[in-house]
Image (cartoon, helix red, strand yellow):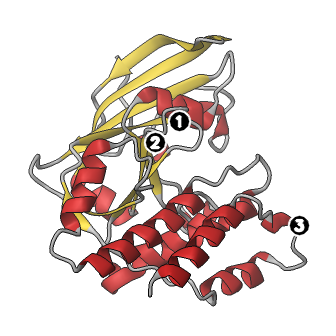
Amino acid sequence: MLYPFFESTRRLIESIDNVDLTTYPYDDDQLLQMLKDSAFSPIITSFSKVVPSFQRLTINRTLPDNKNETIRNLKFLKYPPSESVTKFGRANLKNQSILYGTFILPTAVFELKPTIGDLVTISVWTLKNTDTSLVVFPIVDYDKCSDIQLLEEFIKALFDLPEGWKDIIISDNNIIAKCFSKFVEKGKSTNYLFSASYADRIFKYNGGEIEAIIYPSVQDPVNSANIAIKPQAFDDKYQISEIRECMVISHNILGLYLKDIKVTDSVDDNGNIIWK
């Protein structure tokens, strides 16, 4: 009985990579509405997960009024103000602020691609209380997930459900995983609409209870995980643990070489970074 459903799912997954929304004769709002009105309405399953820490890499010169100079205030290492978000991102719509993080530094380097001579700032964020959890929606490509722990937690969340429901939820998650893994060329942020529209739906689900989405990196060859967190959850639950300023010295087939410039774990009450 479920065969037609899974066959249509398979065709949808195969088609996502080949669709370029930037070539459609519609504006972004029309495209967004079309996606919202589509027949695909995924079942959303979440669970509580302790995420002890994550890190962010900021390319200094990409910040307002920064000419490859040292960052002096902690606010520039956090999420951007919503009014400054003018493009779609992997998990955000326009004018929607989301904080993105990674769990290993190479993932951030692959994602942001700093160039030789760039000053970059690596910030490490840890839980204020070590037993605090996030309500997380996992983006899991069930057949080729590289994050075994996340896959096990996802399967555990489905444990008590009837088999038919499990199959449908796994199928829905595979479709969303495809949207989140769609390669988007520079300058074509409209193609993020696939994942951004579903992220918006996920973050608003059940009164907005979901605080974070964990999803595989597209740029990292091993597909290690990224995390997208709502600003309020980030502010409430995380604190700065370490800040490092580095310079990109070289770039070769083995990757980037970062030279440490300075480091600190001190920030004053006004958010000013006290560099050592």
Residue 46 located left or right of residue 122: left
- N-terminal label among 1 and 2: 1
Residue 276 located left or right of residue 13: left
Element marked by disc 3:
helix
- N-terminal label among 2 and 3: 3
249, above or below 205, in the image: above
Q: Position of residue 21 (x, y in %)?
A: 79, 68
Residue 32 is at least partly visible in this image: yes
| Residue on which the image places disc 3 | 23
Where is residue 138, by image quadrant?
A: bottom left
82 and 173: which is toward the camera: 173
Residue type, numbered disc 3:
Thr
| Residue on which the image places disc 1 | 58
Q: Which residue is found at the position 45% from the left and 70% from the top?
A: 171
Where is residue 48, by image quadrant?
A: bottom left
Mark 1 and mark 2 in contact? Answer it, CB < 8 Å.
Answer: yes
- Label annotation for residue 77: 2
Residue type, numbered disc 1:
Thr
Residue type, numbered disc 2:
Leu
Mark 2 and mark 3 in contact? Answer it, CB < 8 Å.
Answer: no
Q: Nearer the viewer, mark 1 or mark 3?
A: 3
Element marked by disc 1:
strand
The N terminus - image quarter: bottom left
Residue 26 located left or right of residue 17: right
The C terminus - image quarter: top left
Q: Classify mark 1: residues with Cα within 10 Å, few (<14), some (14-19) or many (20+).
A: many
Cα distance between the residues tagged 2 and 3: 34 Å
